[in-house]
Image (spheres, rainbow, N blue to C red):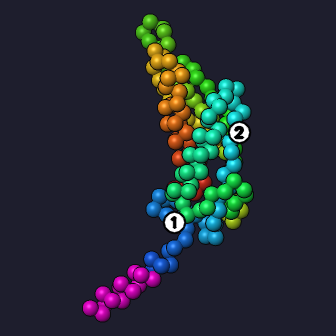
Amino acid sequence: MKTRAIFSLALCLLLAGCSGGYSFTGASIPPGAKTIGISTFPNYASTVNPQLSQTLTDQLTQMFSSQTPLAVTTDEGDLQISGQITGYDTRASALSSSDEVSMNRLTITIRVKFVNTLNPESDFEQQFSRYRDYAASQDFSSVESGLVSEIVTELCEDIFNKSVVNW
């Protein structure tokens, strides 16, 4: 009985001591980090989707606010994410046996800069790119919104993982 009480007390102390730095999403937040500044991603792609900049920024903001204890701000934070959309391209990705386009591919490319004011060794500047294929028989305007949503989700996961998940 006495060992069980000691074990329980030790477990409680251990759990109480682990209150910073880790979340159940796998995020490893540096001790002392309270805020993350996420800037709007301007769209410098040659083809511009007018909703893409806001969609990307909003989804990235939502991901950090729901999966970390950090307060999200548009000002500079302890952690900072900025970047730009550099590519938004649709190209043929597959041909049929009769040499006609059977699949098209939408590719979105972004450039991201991450600054950790508490641990500059983890800063990075990197390009991320994701794509989705769709049947050439489909009208792009009818599938564009769904494709963009899926790609943006993956891009946000890439940024999140690179910046605060140390796998």
Horizontal arrangement in the rendering, residue 18 relative to residue 116 (left or right): left
**Going 61% across and 70% down the picture, which residue do you hit?**
31
Badge 1 density bin: few <14, some 14–19, many ≥20, Cα 10 Å: some
Q: Amino acid at mark 2?
A: Pro
Q: Which residue is mark 2?
A: 42
Q: Residue furthest left?
A: 1
Q: Which residue is mark 1?
A: 22
Q: Secondary structure at mark 2?
A: loop
The location of residue 154, given as percent across then percent down, is 52, 41
Q: Residue furthest bottom?
A: 2
Q: Nearer the viewer, residue 146 or 99?
A: 146
Kindly tell me whether residue 114 is visible in this rendering. no
- Which range of residues does the magenta coloring cover? 1-13
| Disc with the residue nearer the chain's start (1 vs 2) | 1
Q: CA distance from mark 1 to mark 2?
A: 31 Å
Q: Amino acid at mark 1?
A: Tyr
Q: Secondary structure at mark 1?
A: loop
Query: Splitting the image into 4 quarters, where does residue 13 fall?
Result: bottom left
Q: Residue furthest top?
A: 98
- Looking at the image, is 42 positioned above or below residue 160? above
